[in-house]
Image (tube, coloured by chain):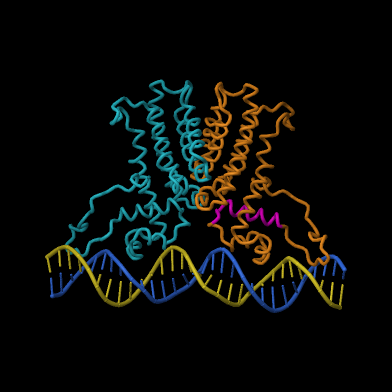
Chain colours: A cyan, B orange, C yellow, D blue
Amino acid sequence: MVQNFYAQERPRPRAYYQHLHEMPRIKEFEPEAALDRALDLFWRRGYEGTSLRDLLDHMDISRQSLYDTFGDKRSLFLKVLARYEALAVEGMLDTLTRTGWSRPIERPLTALVAIRGFFELFLAEVVLDRDRGSCLMANTAIEVGHTDPEIQAVVRAYFGRVEDALHAALARAHEAGELRAGSEPRALARHLVNTLYGLGVMSRAGAGRAALRQMVDVGLSVLVA
Amino acid sequence: MVQNFYAQERPRPRAYYQHLHEMPRIKEFEPEAALDRALDLFWRRGYEGTSLRDLLDHMDISRQSLYDTFGDKRSLFLKVLARYEALAVEGMLDTLTRTGWSRPIERPLTALVAIRGFFELFLAEVVLDRDRGSCLMANTAIEVGHTDPEIQAVVRAYFGRVEDALHAALARAHEAGELRAGSEPRALARHLVNTLYGLGVMSRAGAGRAALRQMVDVGLSVLVA
DNA sequence: GAAATTCTGGACCACCCAGTCAAGATAGTG
DNA sequence: CACTATCTTGACTGGGTGGTCCAGAATTTC
């Protein structure tokens, strides 16, 4: 399941306002947890496909608390996107920049192995999940990317971040002479990003596990000779 | 512009019901033209993002006529998808199966050239169009693919058709020895489909022309040695 | 002319939408 | 205790949703 990818256990914060003179009742619900539940919903149903009703039911907070804590629907969505980025970075993207040694196996991790691992992770935790299937950012790009400039900028920045992480790994591979001769790391990174988020489209169109795996294999085959 | 890709001039049909005894007033509007205008709207705004109001305004027919001719919103959308497929096949996919000679230049068209031409066409007419950006079928896959099984089947069949067309071209190239040694035409076809519809995501996320072109270049580079 | 069928236009429906507001309970602080 | 801020609950708004229905005008064939 994907859940543990973004819904980690965290210590419940108490007494947010200890620096204030007078401080009454503290927040009873966990904003981050509520945000995660909103994320889950937006991820599956999209922005327009998720109604306030749905959100209140799944976040299990009152209408009041939602508006007090997160603002209106669009503000909530922007916070969800930020949270998604943070979780994706620490949960997946970090596997790309983590160079050196793989902890459980204790053997050197080449950049190419790290890249393949990244794709495997994305395949397992996002693409093959029945009611995710696709990256939230990719969904958002399709749904409102060309309509809402601010949201588009968020998505674009996220894709840029993924591209940069891939580029860094590819540059290391390039230095190590692991790439095919004449390769351009930046172009390769862009190609990998394209391949990555194409997978979401194919998955939601009903592509099978074998076909998706083939796409990854061929997509990655441009790296090596 | 993209318009001529799907909005061809057609002879106005007259007297649909000549086989009937009594036949009064015939349809005044052109169903196919109205369908094209609905297609345009769904393409840009998505299924949920397009309201009945929008449709009536853009199709320029009465509420009555819409329901009489196309049924409810979902039925209309299914007809739109069918129309899109027909137009895409005759407007783009045919360039893949059209083997032999290119008409204006009159020189032999290799399968690889045809494939590149297909990507160029898609890039120019869909991806680089400001308020299209992405294939309608890809948009639909993301928006309702995992929710509506019937629509998913339509999208899946369409992608299968594209994959088959690419596969046929690749098989020809394979026979002609144009592909890299050890290539698997079916796997390559799937990879190309993935690359193709990833472009829509990147475009709607705001990717620039140069980046998109690089993605195509690298994506196609797996074909040749 | 009569009959048949489509057209236009607007009224109407029940429901859902995002967002606001008020009332009162509750729980921390001093 | 008083004070303060958050909580929950529910009512409410104005407007939009997809969808139905009806009346009357228009148009074609018999």
Residue D3: image x %, image y %?
18, 71
Q: Is residue A90 above or below residue C6?
A: above
Most foreground residue, A86 or B207: A86
The residue under the point 50% across, 30% down is A218
Q: With D23 as the anchor, is B184 left or right in this view?
A: left
Image label count: 0
The residue under the point 42% across, 57% down is A74
* Chain part drawn in magenta: B31-47
Most foreground residue, A90 or A4: A4
The residue under the point 50% across, 33% down is A214
Q: Residue A63 is drawn in which quadrant?
A: bottom left
Q: Residue D7 is drawn in which quadrant?
A: bottom left
Residue D14: image x %, image y %?
48, 72
Point out the image quarter for the N terminus of chain B: top right
Magenta span includes B197: no
Residue B60: image x %, image y %?
66, 62
Q: With B17 as the anchor, is B88 left or right in this view?
A: left
Point out the image quarter for the C terminus of chain B: top right
Magenta span includes B35: yes
Q: With B220 as the anchor, is A127 left or right in this view?
A: left
Q: What is the magenta segment's predominant secondary structure?
A: helix
The residue under the point 22% across, 57% down is A16
Residue B143: image x %, image y %?
51, 51
Most foreground residue, B171 or A142: B171
